[in-house]
Image (spheres, helix red, strand yellow):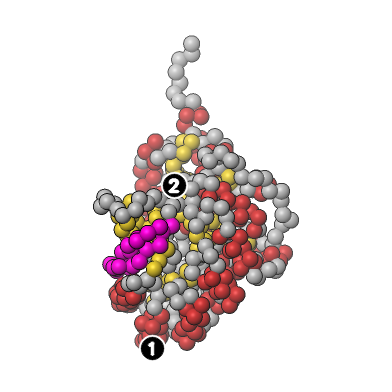
Amino acid sequence: MSPRSGPSPSALRTVSLVTLGCARNEVDSEELAARLTASGWDLTSADDASVVLVNTCGFIQAAKQESIAELLSAAESGAKVAAVGCLAERYGADLAGELPEAQVLSFDDYGEIGARLDDVLAGRERPAHVARDRRTLLPITPSDRQPAPAARPAPPEDPAAPWVGPGGGVFRRRLSGGVVAPLKIASGCDRRCSFCAIPSFRGAFVSRRPPEILAEARWLAGRGVRELVLVSENSTSYGKDLGNLRLLEEVLPDLAATEGIERVRISYLQPAELRPGLIEVIAATPGVAPYFDLSFQHASGRVLRAMRRFGNRERFGALLDQIRERSPQAGVRSNFIVGFPGETGEDLRELELFLSHAGLDAIGIFGYSDEDGTEAASLPGKLDEAEICRRVEEFAGLADELMAQRAEARLGERVDVLIEEEAEDGTPGSFLGRAAHQAPEVDGVTTVRSRLPLAAGDMVRAVVTGSDGVDLIADVKSR
């Protein structure tokens, strides 16, 4: 019998996946998890992992700092560390030079992620990629970006099995339970907003084909998912590279008809691209949440033009009128940037007027920050950080007040609530869920009180009886 020489290599191939940032990153992590499992890696907690894989966010300065802090914390645990995701892709070799504690990997490494982590575990240094503009990797013309469709194997029936997509090109393994899951319909962005660097490291816009999306929806439904949240960098562009700008209007009813799916919600809509036909489908299709996640960013036409965007207070107000004419109870959320270079008091008054009359359910206020490689970083009229913080504080306070008013205005409404879990306080007959106007993570929740037994995944009709900030309280009378 040979003397023990320590754990076998297979015993050391344990990895902890840490996900930062948006729902798109969540899907990416689940695809990475499936690929790692398929290549023999075991997923585990950070305390037991030989490698910690951090899926970073590189959207704004605060997100970058959080990603770097997570990488440093993982390194202090004694595990080997690898960085993937937007921050890693965006900075490549530059990040690797500043952060020798982590091996920096590219989106191009995802297909061989198991082998890449074998290198990390063995201490084999691979040169980090040199950051590049990923928009140049695809043809300029959207219709030239799509390869020929591949064969589509059926999703496996085994609930524990990861899903393998067309030609083996898409894998996914759920990392958490729950009745709500994101479903990616496209990646990349063709817009040229002056403040945003996302297109440069996420690449040009590419839609996923409908059969692939529908197959993944069925796979998710088979694993207990009851609400699909469709995500992309710009959902209103879906189908343009497939030669059909109305494709989303065609796919939404099919997704809503998926057996086991109670509700489909779509996120990341561009106001300038929101067509009347798409409004109609979102507002009127059974099983599609009448929910509009609109990227307004500001309400001053002058600031929006400097942002390389379209619209103003009047146009945005008319769009909301159009939505509510079709669906009076529709939920609307949006994000806004204050402190953009050259923003004046008059610009802020335009924003204040818009917010005060828009009746938005959820409002995110962000302070402007320079992003490497963006046009806005070189614009004149920069405001100092203290002034930007003051404006954020002022408008965040206004947003809290307006959101609370909007929630209170829903008193007496009948809402369809998807139950997610029992209330944490343990009150009998009290459950937490989300109404159609409440998206996961970013919006409020609804506390449902019911004398009838409920379980996660149930969709119930309830009457709003109270509010607390953005959150609602609703009573179920019958099923």
Please determine whether, in this image, residue 470 is positioned above or below residue 428. below
Q: Amino acid at mark 2?
A: Ser
Magenta extent: 459-479
Residue 164 place in picture, x, y as percent: 61, 45
Query: Is residue 202 among what the camera can see?
Result: no
Q: Which mark is residue 346?
A: 1
Task: Give residue 306's position: percent from left, percent from top.
Answer: 50, 81
* Image-quadrant location for residue 439: bottom left
Answer whether residue 470 is magenta in the image. yes
Residue for point 60% across, 41% down:
156
- Name the mark on residue 176: 2
Residue 290 in the image, given as x and y percentages of width and height: 49, 69
Q: Nearer the viewer, mark 1 or mark 2?
A: 2
Residue at the outermost top position: 1
Which residue is nearer to you in this view: 446 or 239? 446
Q: What secondary structure is found at the residue carrying circle 2?
A: loop
Say whether disc 1 or disc 2 marks the residue closer to the N-terminus. 2
Q: Residue sitting at 34 percent across and 75 percent down?
A: 409
In this view, the residue farthest toward the bottom is 346
Residue 243 can be seen in this image: yes
**Label ID, residue 243:** none
